[in-house]
Amino acid sequence: MPNKKPDPESGAGRARKSGSVRGPSGAGPSGAGQAPHGPQARPDGELHPCAYHVVRYLPNLVRDEWVNIGIVLFDPANGHILRRLMEEPGEFARVRRLHPGADEDLLRRLPEEFDAQFASRTSPSPAAAVSEGPGARENLARLTQTLSNAVQLSEQKGLLAADLDAELDRLYRDYVEPPRYGRIFEDLATRNAIRTRANQVFRSTGIWPQLERRLRVAEFTYPGDPLRVDYAYRRNGTRGFVQALPLGRDPGQAKILAFTADAIRAKLPKTEFLAVTEVEPRPQDNPRHRFVTGLLEERGIPVVPLARLAEWAFQLRPTLLSGHSN
């Protein structure tokens, strides 16, 4: 059962008794009297004040207990908003363990609801970004008025950030991802963890600005498809797609990637795909690895572990930066 004492790191605590939610209007970037905190200054960017809310699910308002399910990050300077909500099977399983009667359909619909409320303008940075510009504050305020009683935003808090995407990853990891108490290598056994490490690789190799992030696939599959491809790029008339794919958990993700690749290839003449895994596959020793690599090889989707991702990125870099990306 969640601890009733406020504990933002564990993702469980005691909610405010009123159903109101403090929105961004009139709130400074440090919000709620909290001192700004965040990463150290990066050599490629200056720190600037931002604000964030933790998205909380309260299945039983009488008991007044919550579990953290997402992050909304807001840059007051340009109105840029990013959001990230639960998507991993393990994250939904954790909610079910804490609250067996949880409304999972509601939780799975939340990304569409958030996007609908933030739909006034689309950000050019598609990495989970949902709104920016002068209307972003109004969009965020409207969201707080339309959420169900079971979903609330935490009090606004402030931080200093040089990279909103990196900060969103950090906040999500700290507040939402299930805590991991096992060995170090187990920390990479989820799509969230693989993406976080891949983000670091793509930044260090210089291809990050050339990548689209969190690209919707509904235009290639069926309307309403909630899947998003983690990364996409264009080079020499070819569309490339990169997806995090943990080998140790939920091998069914390989089926989803294979189906999605087939659907995209049916719509686009020139495509290429890549699956990024947490470890080097061992198909000879591990039946799951054999299934995943065999299925993807049949679909022409190479597999690259995180340990070799920088090498792949450096090979891709010249064509991405050459100016012939269309």
Image: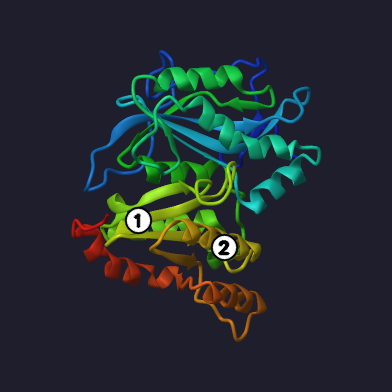
Label 1 secondary element: strand
Note whether 314 is above or below 159 in the view shown: below
**Residue located 32% across and 72% down the image:** 311
**Residue located 75% across and 44% down the image:** 96
Question: Is 182 on the left-hand or right-hand side of 243?
Answer: right
Q: Where is residue 146 in the image (x, y as percent from the top left)?
A: 60, 19
Q: Where is residue 225 in the image (x, y as percent from the top left)?
A: 59, 46
Question: Is 146 on the left-hand or right-hand side of 316?
Answer: right
Note whether 220 is above or below 156 in the view shown: below
Q: Name the residue under label 2.
A: 189
Gap in angstroms between the C-alphas marked 2 and 1: 25 Å
Lower sequence index among marks 2 and 1 = 2
On the rendered image, what quadrant is the C terminus found in? bottom left
Q: Where is residue 244 in the image (x, y as percent from the top left)?
A: 50, 60
Q: How many residues crowd around disc 2 within 10 Å: few (fewer than 14), some, or many (20 or more)?
A: some
The front one of 214 and 5 is 214
Q: Mark 1 points at which residue?
A: 233
Residue 2, visible in the rendered structure: no
- Mark 2 or 1, closer to the camera: 1
Label 2 secondary element: loop
**Residue located 35% across and 56% down the image:** 233
Residue 65, visible in the rendered structure: yes
Q: Which residue lies furthest to the right in this view?
A: 101
Note whether 15 is above or below 67 in the view shown: above
Amino acid type, mark 1: Tyr
Amino acid type, mark 2: Ala
Q: How is the image coloured?
A: rainbow
Tell me which corner region of the image, top left, top right, bottom left or bottom right, holds residue 64: top right
Q: Position of residue 272 (x, y in %)?
A: 41, 65
